[in-house]
Image (cartoon, rainbow, N blue to C red):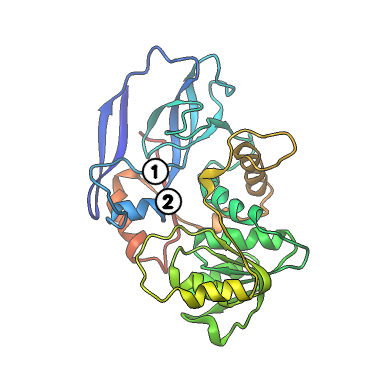
């Protein structure tokens, strides 16, 4: 059966290619899924598209946020033929996926019937956001500083707001601050260096940028006995004297937590809500109930053949473009 897929072939270079893939003899835990939409990750995916990720080579098939329908399935797949599902799959019109394969992405997750399939492509972004929120010691009225108002930062801020926190978003780009305000984050600070605006303001500071100077700002602006959550993935080198940072953490009795979301267990464990399955259900509820209006973050829904322009816009027009979704329904 013919499959169309996006492939990165060099720095800033991408193409829509085609191939034949076998669709017969599915294993018991396999499914054949026809894609409807997939979302470009403006973090991990862009780092590959423009060679920012170290030790990386081309060609590669990017993407891990797909929504599609089950065409065929093995007997152990819970979803039925025709069901709408979410899978961690690369950008392609057709995928053959194994449920429980940790390399591919562990779940073929059946989506609620009333979910918007375009908005559902943001599930992975919400999963990243909820990891940082769930790891923090939130109390009603906690003062929270969200450093970085990209898409995940805004989602994090909205989740803290829903939990009854006093939330401030910090970002140097006015358009991002304005977007956050339009989604209910009334307090924002638009500044490259927020020192003059903030002074030990937060019980919880969460970095969503992965930038070392921003992490230092988080530590500086957290109260004694507060928490610093590292949600962003550090990728760029940064040279400094680390002793003042460690001294602040030590003298202020701060708790610093890493929040890499791939460490979350897949299946629910008795006595704990910390699992991929539970988080998937929670973020689907947020989408379906419009607790977070994902549609405000989606800038474009495009034909996959325009992939190279999409990556360019996400890289160089960040002030105007947030999320881009591929529409696979005509392939």
**Quarter location, residue 110:** top right
- The CA span between labels 2 and 1 is 7 Å
Residue 50: x percent and y percent? 28, 56
Residue 170 visible in the current orientation: no
Q: Mark 1 Cα within 10 Å, few/some/many (few <14, many 20+)? A: some
Left or right of 67 on screen, residue 166: right
Establish if 222 lies above or below 307: below
Residue 218: x percent and y percent? 55, 72
Q: Tag on residue 11? A: none
Q: Residue at x 55, y 59 (%)?
A: 296
Q: Which residue is mark 2?
A: 41
Give the mark count.
2
Between residue 4 and residue 206, name the one nearer to us: 206
Q: Closer to the N terminus: mark 2 or mark 1?
A: 2
Q: Residue at x 58, y 24 (%)?
A: 79
Establish if 24 lies above or below 109: above
Establish if 162 lies above or below 90: below
Q: Which residue is mark 1?
A: 63
Q: Residue at x 54, y 62 (%)?
A: 153
Between residue 288 and residue 53, name the one nearer to us: 53
Left or right of 235 on screen, residue 115: right
């Amino acid at each position: 059966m013919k499959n169309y897929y996006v492939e990165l072939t060099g720095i800033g270079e991408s193409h829509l290619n085609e191939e034949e893939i076998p669709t017969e003899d599915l294993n018991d835990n396999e499914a054949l899924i026809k894609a409807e939409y997939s979302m470009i990750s403006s973090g991990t995916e862009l780092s590959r598209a423009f060679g920012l990720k170290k030790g990386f080579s081309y060609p590669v098939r990017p993407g891990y946020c797909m929504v599609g329908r089950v065409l065929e399935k093995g007997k152990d797949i819970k979803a039925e033929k025709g069901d709408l599902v979410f899978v961690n799959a690369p950008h392609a019109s057709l995928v053959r996926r194994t449920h429980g394969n940790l390399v591919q992405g562990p779940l073929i997750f059946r989506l609620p019937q009333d979910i918007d399939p375009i908005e559902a492509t943001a599930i992975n972004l919400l999963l990243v956001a909820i990891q940082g929120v769930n790891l923090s010691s939130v109390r009603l009225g906690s003062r929270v500083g969200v450093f970085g108002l990209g898409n995940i930062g805004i989602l994090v801020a909205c989740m803290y707001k829903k939990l009854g926190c006093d939330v401030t978003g910090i970002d140097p780009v006015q358009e991002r601050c304005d977007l956050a305000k339009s989604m209910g984050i009334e307090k924002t600070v638009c500044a490259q260096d927020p020192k003059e605006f903030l002074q030990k303001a937060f019980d919880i500071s969460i970095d969503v940028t992965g930038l070392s100077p921003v992490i230092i700002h988080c530590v500086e602006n957290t109260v004694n006995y507060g928490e610093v959550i590292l949600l962003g993935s550090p990728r760029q080198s940064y040279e400094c004297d680390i002793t003042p940072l460690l001294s602040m953490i030590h003298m202020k009795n701060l708790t610093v937590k890493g929040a890499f979301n791939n460490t979350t267990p897949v299946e629910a464990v008795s006595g704990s809500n910390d699992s991929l399955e539970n988080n998937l259900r929670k973020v689907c509820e947020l989408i379906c109930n419009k607790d977070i209006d994902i549609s405000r973050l989606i800038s474009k829904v495009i034909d996959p053949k325009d992939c190279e322009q999409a990556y360019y816009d996400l890289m160089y027009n960040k002030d105007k473009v947030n999320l881009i979704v591929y529409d696979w329904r005509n392939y």
